[in-house]
Image: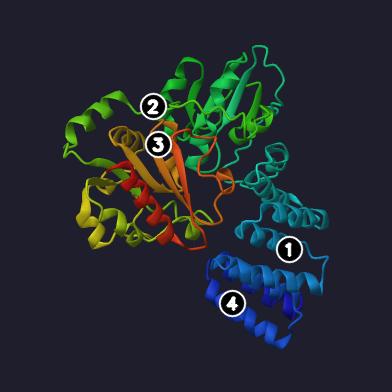
Amino acid sequence: MTAGEATAGGIAALTDAGKFADAMAQCAHALAANSHEVAARINQGAAHLGLGDATAARRAFNRAINDDPTVAAAWNGLGNALYDLGRPDDAAAALNTAANLSPDPAMPRFHRAMALLAAGDYAQGWAEYEHRTVPLTLRRHAAPPWKGDALDGRRLLISAEQGYGDMIQFARFVPLVAAQGGTVVFEVPAELLPLFAPFADSVTLTATEDGPVDGVDCHIHLMSLARILGVTANTVPAAAPYIAAPPARVAAWREAMQDDGGLRIGIAWAGRPSYPQDAQRSMDCAHLGPLAALDGLSLYSLQKDRTTRPITDELAASLTDDFSRLPNDFAETAAIIENLDLIITVDSAIGHIAGALGKLVWVLLSFAADWRWMREHADTPWYPAMRLFRQDAAGDWAGVMARVCEALVDTGC
């Protein structure tokens, strides 16, 4: 290993650890010694992306490509930067080049999938999505993969994967598969099982934590079902509700929540901190100040994790109730949501729960929103009662909240 390679590896480790400022300083030092050091330039681009500056990242990756156009990592980085700049078609092209150059094209092809899906190209997007690399949530099973052929009485295992929001969003496909014949076993984390009670008439539910499922003839991961079923942006099955909160808990919260005559709004301002793009999708709750200042609203905090996005004293004082005091229980959260009039949340599991319940929900999106919300749309084929509020520029939560407040005033709250 050369000194340059060792330095590049150390900088990449800093970036992987989220220490972007330290990585930038090391990149500057390496590039001062050699401005054509491609690995340092790629690491510089990655650090810029981590800091949310896609424009600077694009410049860094382009300079790396100018110095050596055969390096797959530079094209992969450029594709990610173009995605964050709201250019999914250009991103897909760059990522295709990265895949063609790479001896292991899985990562650029997975990134390309998200660009294609964001652009609305579901046919190619689902095919590329099969290259996803999320080993912690893709359990391996001995049963052969199901390829969409007739089940003919066979027993199919569908394993949930990735984040809770993904599981809730894609669970809609499970009853459709069960309706095609055979026996379907749906394996999900135990904490989500109560939400899928409506599936029990046609699907066998089992908890991931219970260990491997025996006696199955074939297997598929949940997020491959869209490809198997040939789902397009125009054919997403969007009937809601398709999950349910436990009726007894819904009734208990109906009794417990005081009716003050205001529009009951549940709010959440941050997602899971371990999500790679959490810095972009989550916001400081201070941005909710204009919402709290409106008359005629009763605000209920649905936010659980306060470690990275704590609540301000001003917002806390404006809440009718703060449900962070409750255990992190999805069934309880769903029961509370059923007793609210509107949910306003960043892109997190809260939005998926509300959408799958058929509740009115407004989702606040970063400029480089996740692929599932596509581009420029104010609605989504995934949840008919959902409205999307997008940043006009990276980091512009103030503009998003101004439009949210205007929309609330227009409703006569």
Image position, residue 57 (x, y; %): 64, 69
Q: Quadrant of residue 144?
A: top right
Q: CA distance from mark 2 to mark 4?
A: 47 Å
Left/right of residue 21 with respect to residue 120 in the rendered view: left
Distance (Cα) linking label 1 and label 4: 18 Å
Query: Which label belongs to residue 244?
Result: 2
- Amino acid identity at mark 4: Met
**Which numbered disc flags the more N-terminal residue, 1 or 4?**
4
Q: Amino acid at mark 1?
A: Ala
Which residue is at 70% across, 63% downward?
78
Residue placed under numbered mark 3 in the picture = 354
Q: Earlier in the sequence, mark 2 or mark 3?
A: 2
- 376 versus 123 height, above or below: below
Q: Are marks 1 and 3 in contact (CB under 8 Å)?
A: no
Q: Quadrant of residue 177?
A: top right
Residue 322 place in picture, x, y as percent = 24, 48
Distance of mark 2 from mark 3, alpha carbons? Answer: 10 Å
Between circles 2 and 3, the one closer to the viewer is 3
Q: Is residue 357 visible?
A: yes
Q: Whole-percent x and y of residue 393? A: 52, 62
Residue 24, disc: 4
Q: Are marks 2 and 1 in contact (CB under 8 Å)?
A: no
Q: Which residue is mark 1?
A: 73
Q: CA distance from mark 1 to mark 3?
A: 38 Å
